[in-house]
Amino acid sequence: MNSQHITLLTFGYFDKGLLEEVAGAVSREFNYPVICRDIHIDLSEFYDAGRRQYNGDKVLKTVVSKHDYDSIKTIGLLNIDLFIPILTYIFGQAQLGGSAGIASMYRLSNELYGLKHDVGLQKERFIKEVIHELGHAFGLLHCHDVVCVMRSGSYVEDIDQKSKDFCQNCRRMMESTVNPS
Ligand SMILES: [Zn+2]
Ligand SMILES: [Zn+2]
């Protein structure tokens, strides 16, 4: 029954080792095989010259349109500064209970906040962000458990506080949407 997989759709260059780690973490957390696919698309169509950022709603729409039905969920991976009209920036977003989400590395790097470059930390944050957005795509809402990956966060410090795992409650909810009895 688990012939379906989760697709990681990469926009632009991603380090292979990093992708393997993200794929491994996603596969462990959701219990689905994970496949990676590149998408070759001109990102300038999402660029908002006034804000000097990329429109997250348009990127998400594109990921939705590229979702293929062999895949249970598709998440777009990016390394650009994303916004949505009501927020200054976003780390990512997803359709609640839908087919797709997006997550960007861009705001997760230490340098952006005047701190020392830390590849490992940026990778940890990215993995949490990808799992968080996929959680939304699987229908999960934000959670108040301090270390649950579904806790909402506006700052990288919030991401650093939580783990990359679901709390028991979220896990139970996730499993009941995947395997409704
Ligand atoms: Zn969220
Ligand atoms: Zn939770």
Image (tube, grey):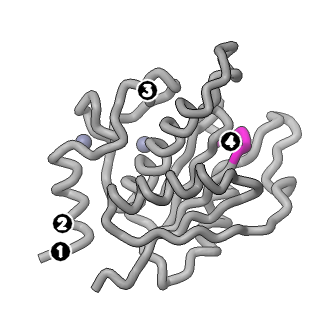
Q: Are marks 4 and 2 in contact (CB under 8 Å)?
A: no
Gap between marks 3 and 2 measured at Cα: 28 Å
Marks 1 and 4, the one that precedes in the sequence: 4
Element under disc 1: loop
Quickly name the residue at label 1.
180
Crowding at label 1, few (<14), some or many (≥20) Cα neighbours within 10 Å? Answer: few
Residue 134 rendering spot, x and y as whole percentages: 43, 56
Circle 3 residue: 160
Q: Position of residue 97 (x, y in %)?
A: 38, 63
Q: Which picture quadrant has residue 80?
A: top right
Label 4 – label 2 distance at C-alpha: 32 Å
Residue appearing at x 39%, y 54% in the figure = 136
Which amino acid, mark 3? Asp
In the rendered image of this protein, does residue 89 appear above or below residue 43?
above
Give me the C-alpha separation between circle 4 and circle 3.
20 Å
Q: Residue at x 56, y 45 (%)?
A: 92
Farthest-out residue, left:
181
Q: Tell me if label 1 and label 2 are in contact, CB under 8 Å.
A: yes
Q: Residues within 10 Å of mark 4 (few under 14, many from 20)?
A: many
When the figure is inspected, residue 24 is found, relative to residue 108, above or below; the finding is: below
Q: Which mark is residue 176?
A: 2
Residue labelled 4 has its Cβ within 8 Å of some atom of ligand 1:
no
Provide the secondary structure element on which disc 4 rests.
strand
Q: Position of residue 91 (x, y in %)?
A: 57, 39
Q: Which residue is mark 4?
A: 82
134 left or right of 36? left
Q: Amino acid under label 1?
A: Pro
- Mark 4 or mark 3: whose residue is earlier in sequence: 4
Q: Earlier in the sequence, mark 3 or mark 1?
A: 3
